[in-house]
Amino acid sequence: MPQRNNSGEIQSVQTAFQILEELRRRNEASLMELTDAFSLSKSSIHNYLSTLEGDGYVVKDGSTYRLSLKHLALGGKARHREQIYDIARDEVTDLAEETGEMANLLVEENGKGIYIHRDHGADAVKTDSYVGQRVNLHSTALGNAILAHLPEERVDEIIEQHGLPGMTENTITERDELFERLKRVRTEGVAFDDEARVKGLRCVAVPIVNNDDVVEGAISVSGPTSRLQGDRFRSELPAKLKSVANVIELNITYT
């Protein structure tokens, strides 16, 4: 019988996923590095890795282990189950080409934001963000655009679950301040991120809301503070994003 903790979770399954998360974080790791990262014996970690390798989730390359491309297939399958991905993907790509910056599509799952599509414009600045990455909703314009259209009770649940950790000195870390920000986002229909998650980076985002007034996700344009400033940051990009969001929302309605 698999050992369960008090919440009913199977510990061996939980450990296997923690090992996968550690490999994702490190890109690759040796058996000894993984043993040092967990309170388990070397033989136990080896057994986990052998099982994950046998099932195709881990690849052994010499003395190190890394995630296999099987995760790509799983992620791709999950992504295509999101209707908004198929509908918004091309619009986001066009947005990147037209602005020359990074364009993003984010959805909420289990209280976190997940990038399901990103595209680089000609002048886009590379960051550590990637498709599939989970981020705290309070620390991004994309996340604020989504939170602003969730019920207050749901936002409180997310805060209780994930907290309001600071990423930079500009990150909102107080509940009352966050709710004031979300009220403004609802009124203006646009969210701004002024170095709240990454120093030197600004972001403008708008929500994607379906015909039942349910938020499906959010789209954004992000770039360096040197380019995202003045009218471009406060007027031009918000207007462009709202126009693109309107097209996506219409396509959701009639698809």
Image (cartoon, rainbow, N blue to C red):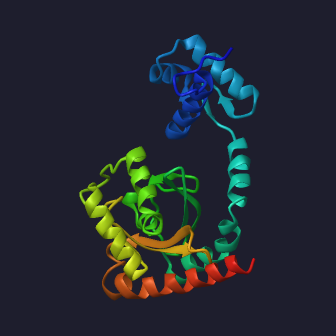
The answer to whether 62 is drawn above or below residue 197 in the figure is above
The C terminus lies in quadrant: bottom right
Is residue 79 visible to us here?
A: yes
- Which of these two is toward me, 81 or 53? 81
The N terminus lies in quadrant: top right
Considering every residue shown, the one lying at the far left of the view is: 169
Q: What residue is rendered at 73% in x and 42% in y?
A: 70
The answer to whether 169 is drawn above or below residue 34 in the figure is below
Image spot of residue 5 (x, y percent): 54, 22
Q: What residue is rendered at 43% in x and 57% in y?
A: 153
Image spot of residue 237 (x, y percent): 44, 83
The answer to whether 193 is drawn above or below residue 46 in the figure is below
- Which of these two is toward me, 179 or 106? 179
Residue 27 location, quadrant: top right
Residue 200 location, quadrant: bottom left
- Which of these two is toward me, 191 or 48? 191
Image spot of residue 31 (x, y percent): 56, 21
Q: What residue is rendered at 58% in x and 84% in y?
A: 246
Count of all numbered marks drawn on residues in the image: 0
- Which of these two is toward me, 126 or 104? 104
150 vs 66, left or right, is: left
Residue 243 location, quadrant: bottom right
Q: What residue is rendered at 41% in x and 67% in y?
A: 141
Is residue 102 visible to us here?
A: no
Image spot of residue 234 (x, y percent): 35, 83
